[in-house]
Amino acid sequence: MSARIVALGGGHGLYATLSAARRLTPHVTAVVTVADDGGSSGRLRNELDVVPPGDLRMALAALAADTPHGQLWATIIQHRFGGSGALAGHPIGNLMLAGLNEVLADPVAALDELGRVLGLKGRVLPMCPIALQIEADVGGLETDPRMSRVIRGQVGIATTVGKVRRVRLLPGNPPATRQAVDAIMAADLVVLGPGSWFTSVIPHVLVPQLAAALQATQARRALVLNLVSEPGETAGFSAERHLHVLAQHAPGFRVHDIVVDAASVPSEREREQLRRTAATLDAAVEFSDVSRPGTPLHDPARLAAALDRVRLRGSTAAPTVEPTIPTPTVRSVDER
């Protein structure tokens, strides 16, 4: 039986992980953040009180079947209406998910139904069955550098000029989607990241049932670090700083492997520092060439090879020599 991979995240980072994971196995489950409050997703959650669909839509597109039918529908759900009317800026897939949710009264059922249209062998799940908000303590916005200001909302946090110190979810201690917990517990490999660190990665370990499942699962657990720091959320962050803030938000959280782009940590001194920091999470560091040359993006084939090496450390399975499913070509990957 093919390996079962669960990838947690949101936005373009999760899209990259899914594009890599589907090269290794058709049995891929995406667990997606549900706190987006900008663009089309923000409008739909405010008007219809639905789980924000944008990141979920992107995950569906990433896992769409590599058939003419699947790829046509991947392009359709990513297509964004133009013009200046009420539909302007809405991707078709966001509207379909919102409509399916109203008809079926269940966000998981809505995703499964649209997944069937796209020919998914895997599955896309929200990390929580309800929409969440993210709230952050941000420094550097007051005259007194010791003071913090509270900023609420994913867009506000992602675009702040201050320094994000800590984030939390609203409501506190939110429920996890039961199917997401089940998928983590049944997985062979669980991958967290890359992505917007405070708004797409850390939120997963702030959901108590998800955090408990991540620690209880027998799966190999891998953390994929970003290639570069992000303006706003993680400006100036080193690789070690990413690990420190994750550990601060989830004391006791452990992973087996941390995948780091070799070019982003070029010196042996920096690598040794990162290894020491990784040891606090009981993790080994996998230095690999995982970037797409000339871009700040992960290369799906290279990331797939790194994840396969990580998977095999916890398995007796043979390596995946050839990709089982090519990466889909999708014209638009705007996350909202």
Image (cartoon, rainbow, N blue to C red):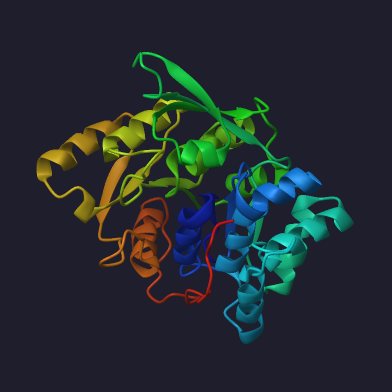
Residue sitting nearer the eye, 48 or 27:
48
Quadrant containing the N terminus is bottom right
Q: Residue at x 60, y 47 (%)?
A: 38
Q: Residue furthest bottom?
A: 68
Q: Residue at x 49, y 36 (%)?
A: 157
Residue 277 vertical placement versus 14 (above, below):
above
Q: Residue furthest right?
A: 103
184 sits to left or right of 161: right
Can residue 333 be seen here? The reply is yes
253 sits to left or right of 244: right
Query: Residue 103 appears in which quarter of the rendering?
Result: bottom right
Q: How many marks?
A: 0
Quadrant containing the C terminus is bottom right
Q: Residue at x 11, y 44 (%)?
A: 268
Residue 334 x/y as whole percent:
53, 61
Q: Residue at x 52, y 61 (%)?
A: 3
Q: Residue furthest front?
A: 84
50 sits to left or right of 176: right
Residue 274 vertical placement versus 100 (above, below):
above
Residue 309 x/y as whole percent:
34, 58
Query: Residue 155 appears in which quarter of the rendering?
Result: top right
Can residue 282 be seen here? The reply is no
Residue 315 x/y as whole percent:
42, 55
Residue sitting nearer the eye, 38 or 236:
38
Residue 313 x/y as whole percent:
36, 52
